[in-house]
Image (cartoon, helix red, strand yellow):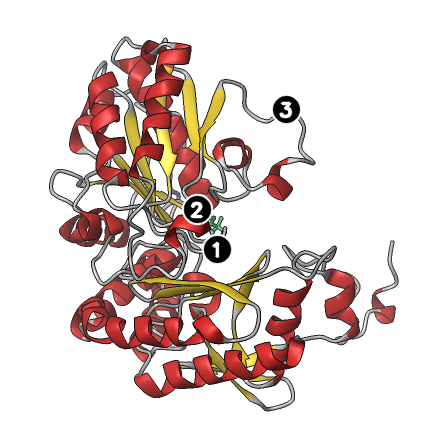
């Protein structure tokens, strides 16, 4: 047993940090102790502008009073209710409010606690859906290179980020991948969706024909790939995926963990691109990142296919202790109300042109090889330092933090996604800081 007295509050050894260079961090910690609206306060009392909405989740900005109060009140009134065979009103009300903003006919909501759980839940719904309809031969799941679908086994199996998969054995069987859509030679410095690459969707048809379409359950893609470094879909690509899915009876899953809840200026990317998937996975912005919660949104027919057999029997053997947790539900309701009352999704249409110009103003900054944007998302791709991939971007991240702006990097790409309340002055600060930093890191 460890000696508790030896553990001092500033002892950083016990916490094994996720997706973090632990040794680098612990030598030079970057600690936030407070946050309000667009800013964090560091342990040293410095203000840091949030250029990433935390981890793409704090869409309404930090410590919003309505959300804080809803959580406080709910925790004092009904802290927890069993999620299985019992209910509480908040979870039902939130599902209805989510259904208000989903594409038509997608009115059924299954709760999870994270994006990773939403993805694994969606994959399980897809497999089970085919089975309950008597098409149990559809067991294959198709993902895409460079896709990020969280870190659970289903998600990393269909995911396509090599470092997230290579350590973990055989993963799920029966998985295949279509190619990613990043083509910097043809699409460099694109504003919005790139012109080239729609034909890459035809990979799905090739794979379906290779394995026989009757074996394919679902394909999952991020409508805008986020974590891999912001890849908007080529013009016409998502429509083509939809058509191939329809042709072969394959379910189309949009992983909207990042794009959901306003990031593109519509509730979901499905509406932005006018392509309706069969299942949408969400999390993050659902509760403004404040309390963990995810939601899988499914077409009514998919849900209804399960509602057969004797009524006392459980229809879908899946769920989490905290599915629809009362405090998370209260946070979700207050968050959706905040988005609506403040017109935050609509705001994006007004500010996205300024954002786009700002992103592309960095095209001539040192070592920039591409800039791209869509909605309130942007990316600055850097040339890697020879023999030291990721180092240039990581140095830029550390320097930007020191200069008062939080950015996020993935490989040698800077990814940006500020809260939807962000104003022009914040965009100016993000861009001028990145320009300075790129001059310094060389
Ligand atoms: C598209 C997508 N799916 C799933 C996830 C996983 O979400 P979580 O970290 O909440 O498990 C993320 C997280 O960034 C994501 O971007």
Between tags 1 and 2, which lies in front? 2
Nearer-the-camera pick, 135 or 33 = 135
For the residues carrying marks 3 and 1, which lies nearer the camera in this image?
1
In three-dimensional space, the C-alpha distance between marks 1 and 2, rounded to whole angstroms, equals 10 Å
Sequence-first tag of 1 and 2: 2
Judge left or right: residue 400 versus residue 85: right
- The residue at the point 35 percent across, 52 percent down is 232
Q: Could you give the CA–CA distance between mark 3 and mark 1, rounded to whole angstroms? A: 26 Å
- Residue at the bottom extreme of this rendering: 45
Disc with the residue nearer the chain's start (3 vs 1):
3
At horizontal 25% and vertical 25% (from top left) the residue drawn is 244
Q: Is residue 210 above or below residue 61?
A: above
Q: Do the residues under discs 1 and 2 have CB atoms within 8 angstroms?
A: yes
Residue position for label 2 = 182
Q: Which residue is mark 3?
A: 170
Question: Residue 293 got which mark?
Answer: none
Where residue 94 appears, as percent x and y from the top left, is: 24, 53
308, 206: nearer the viewer? 206
Q: Tell me the residue at 44%/39% (across/down).
A: 180
70 and 287: which is toward the camera: 287
Q: For residue 20, what is the image quadrant?
A: bottom right
Q: Position of residue 290 (x, y in %)?
A: 42, 65
Callout 1: few (<14), some (14-19), or many (20+) C-alpha neighbours within 10 Å?
A: many
SS at mark 3?
loop
Classify residue 54 as left or right of residue 317.
Answer: right
Marks 3 and 1 close (CB-CB < 8 Å): no
Above-or-below relation of 400 to 349: below
Task: Quickly name the residue at label 1.
Answer: 229
């Amino acid at each position: 047993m460890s000696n508790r007295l030896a553990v001092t509050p500033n002892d950083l050894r016990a916490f094994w940090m996720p997706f973090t260079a632990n040794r680098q961090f612990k030598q030079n910690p970057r600690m936030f102790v407070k946050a309000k609206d667009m800013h964090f306060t560091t342990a040293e009392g410095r203000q840091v502008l949030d250029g990433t909405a935390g981890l793409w989740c704090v869409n309404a900005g930090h410590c919003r009073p309505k959300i804080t109060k809803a959580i406080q009140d709910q925790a004092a009134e009904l802290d927890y209710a069993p999620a299985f065979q019992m209910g509480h009103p908040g979870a039902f009300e939130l599902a209805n409010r989510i259904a208000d903003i989903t594409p038509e006919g997608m009115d059924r909501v299954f709760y999870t606690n994270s994006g990773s759980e939403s993805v694994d839940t969606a994959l399980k719904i897809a497999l089970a859906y085919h089975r309950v309809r008597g098409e149990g031969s559809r067991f294959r799941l198709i993902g895409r290179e460079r896709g990020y679908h969280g870190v659970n086994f289903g998600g990393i199996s269909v995911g396509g980020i090599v470092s997230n998969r290579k350590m973990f054995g055989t993963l799920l069987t029966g998985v295949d991948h279509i190619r990613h859509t990043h083509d910097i030679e043809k699409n460099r410095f694109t504003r919005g969706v790139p012109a080239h690459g729609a034909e890459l969707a035809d990979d799905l048809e090739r794979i379906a024909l290779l394995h026989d379409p009757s074996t394919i359950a679902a394909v999952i893609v991020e409508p805008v790939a986020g974590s891999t470094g912001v890849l908007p879909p080529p013009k016409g690509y998502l429509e083509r995926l939809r058509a191939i899915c329809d042709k072969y009876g394959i379910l189309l899953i949009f992983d909207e963990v990042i794009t959901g809840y306003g990031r593109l200026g519509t509730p979901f990317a499905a509406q932005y691109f006018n392509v309706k998937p069969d299942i949408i996975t969400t999390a993050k912005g659902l509760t403004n990142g404040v309390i963990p919660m995810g939601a899988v949104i499914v077409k009514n027919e998919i849900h209804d296919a399960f509602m057969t057999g004797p009524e006392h029997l459980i229809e879908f053997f899946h769920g989490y202790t905290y599915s629809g947790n009362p405090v998370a539900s209260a946070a979700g309701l207050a968050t959706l109300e905040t988005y609506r009352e403040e017109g935050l999704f609509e705001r994006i249409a007004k500010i996205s042109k300024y954002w786009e110009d700002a992103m592309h103003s960095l095209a001539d900054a040192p070592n920039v090889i591409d800039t791209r944007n869509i909605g309130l998302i942007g990316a600055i791709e850097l040339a890697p330092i020879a023999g030291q991939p990721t180092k240039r971007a990581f140095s830029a991240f550390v320097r930007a933090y020191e200069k008062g702006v939080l950015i996020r990097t993935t490989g040698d790409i800077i990814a940006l996604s500020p809260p939807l309340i962000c104003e022009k002055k914040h965009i100016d600060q993000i861009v001028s800081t990145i320009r300075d930093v790129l001059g310094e890191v060389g």
